[in-house]
Amino acid sequence: MGKFSFISMEEARRLALDNGYIVVDLRGSQEYYKSHIENAINIPSADVSQILEFGKKDHTWILYCRRGSFSFKLASELSDYGYKALAVVGGYRE
């Protein structure tokens, strides 16, 4: 399993405003359109290959889902490929 870091929702919101970060909302599109972190892109139920297609290995990826477990798994997989990944603790429930 790859090494990645955990961050809070508040930290994710702050970092989302920085160009060095790519924020991915892994929830369904209805949840995304209802509410999401500013600048987040929606890739529902993404797998690692979808993220790898973007390239952008020089950026840090912030991942969040509804509860946190899926974003942890994907962050770990991304780090196995040498990506910098952060997973939001507790997920997004607004």
Image: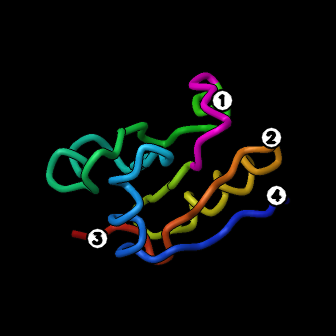
Q: CA distance from mark 4 to mark 3?
A: 26 Å
Q: Earlier in the sequence, mark 1 or mark 4?
A: 4
Query: Mark 4: which amino acid?
Result: Gly
Q: Earlier in the sequence, mark 2 or mark 4?
A: 4
Q: CA distance from mark 1 to mark 4?
A: 15 Å
**Residue 79 position within the rendered picture, expressed as x and y whole percent measured from the top left:** 76, 51
Q: Which mark is residue 52?
A: 1
Task: Please tell me in which quadrant of the rendered image residue 51 appears.
Answer: top right
Foreground of the two, 28 or 90: 90
Residue picked out by circle 4: 2
Q: CA distance from mark 2 to mark 4?
A: 8 Å
Q: Which mark is residue 93?
A: 3
| Left or right of 58 on screen, residue 91 | left
Quarter placement of the N terminus: bottom right
Q: Earlier in the sequence, mark 4 or mark 3?
A: 4
Q: Earlier in the sequence, mark 3 or mark 1?
A: 1
Say whether marks 2 and 3 touch (CB < 8 Å): no
Foreground of the two, 51 or 82: 82
Q: Is residue 54 above or below residue 38?
A: above
Q: CA distance from mark 2 to mark 1?
A: 9 Å
Residue picked out by circle 2: 81
| Left or right of 28 on screen, residue 20 | right
